Image (cartoon, rainbow, N blue to C red):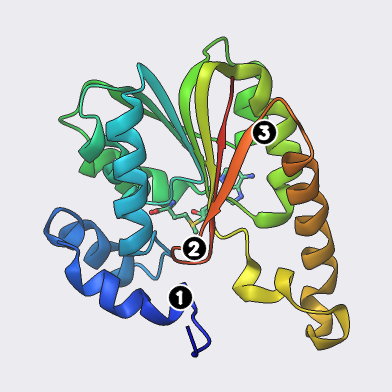
Amino acid sequence: MNVEFSASFCEPFISSLSDDAPYKELRKLAEAHGVPSLELSACQALRNIASVKRPGKSIDIGCGIGVSTLAILSGCPGTEHTAVDGNLERILIFNEFFKNRPNVRSRQMRGEQWLTGCADTYDLAFVDSVKREYPIIWQRLRPKLNEGAVAVFDDVLLYGYVCCQEAEVPAKYRSNRLEMINFLTEIFSDASLSAQIIPVSGGMLVISLP
Ligand SMILES: C[S@@+](CC[C@H](N)C(=O)[O-])C[C@H]1O[C@@H](n2cnc3c(N)ncnc32)[C@H](O)[C@@H]1O
């Protein structure tokens, strides 16, 4: 191949193939409230993971108003699903949207805090909180994951800065970049895990447990 190929260069084309109908209403609501929500291509990837994994129990940490939760439920409608977000306003919108889904519950608290106190264990976890909290969330999440579980962390490429030399990175992202690189190194050097970064959206880290 004689051209520089980048998967993200193709993302607008890939996204144009996806059907955004299931997410339209909720994404509009997110936009209206100025709340960040999962990109369409990432929704598709998460939905596919859920549909292959068929989790009995799933968790969404940093659920916002629920776009990522909707992606998980689209892939596996019957999963017993817990959604956690620290922001009360977002949880209230979430509750209204999912009020007719008896298998969905939400908690307004920090993900780390929920994972420390809960008795549940999960087959699928999606994490989309503050990126520098990923290492602590992983530390608390891992003991709560069942055999064969899958954990997905969104936006691990930090706008591509994890791939750049430190000198090329704006000062305000340098410590984030280093922390993310350390986190990724920890995951990829753990021989008991199978990990991959899928180049959709800001980079999705998918970790499979034995
Ligand atoms: C990018 S938004 C999530 C969007 C959501 N996944 C969706 O697709 O609609 C990040 C969310 O994480 C929440 N958050 C950040 N740190 C958190 C933490 N430690 N525990 C729980 N929620 C957190 C924020 O309140 C925010 O709503």
Q: Is residue 39 left or right of residue 112?
A: left
Amino acid type, callout 3: Glu
Q: Are marks 3 and 2 in contact (CB under 8 Å)?
A: no
Q: Quadrant of residue 164?
A: bottom right
Residue 112 appears at what percent x and percent y? 67, 33
Residue 96 appears at what percent x and percent y? 23, 42
Label 2 to label 1, Cα distance in Å? Answer: 7 Å
Between 5 and 173, the one lying in front of the other is: 5
Between 193 and 39, the one lying in front of the other is: 193
Q: Quadrant of residue 177?
A: bottom right
Which residue corresponds to mark 3?
112
Label 1 to label 3, Cα distance in Å? Answer: 31 Å
Q: Are marks 2 and 1 in contact (CB under 8 Å)?
A: yes
Q: Is residue 116 left or right of residue 167?
A: left
Q: Nearer the viewer, mark 3 or mark 2?
A: 2
Q: State the mark number for residue 138.
A: none
Which residue corresponds to mark 1?
8
Which residue corresponds to mark 2?
199
Where, quadrant-wise, is the C terminus in this rendering?
top right
Q: Helix, strand, or loop for circle 2?
A: loop
Number of other residues with Cα within 10 Å of mark 3, as a class: few under 14, some 14 to 19, many 20 or more? some
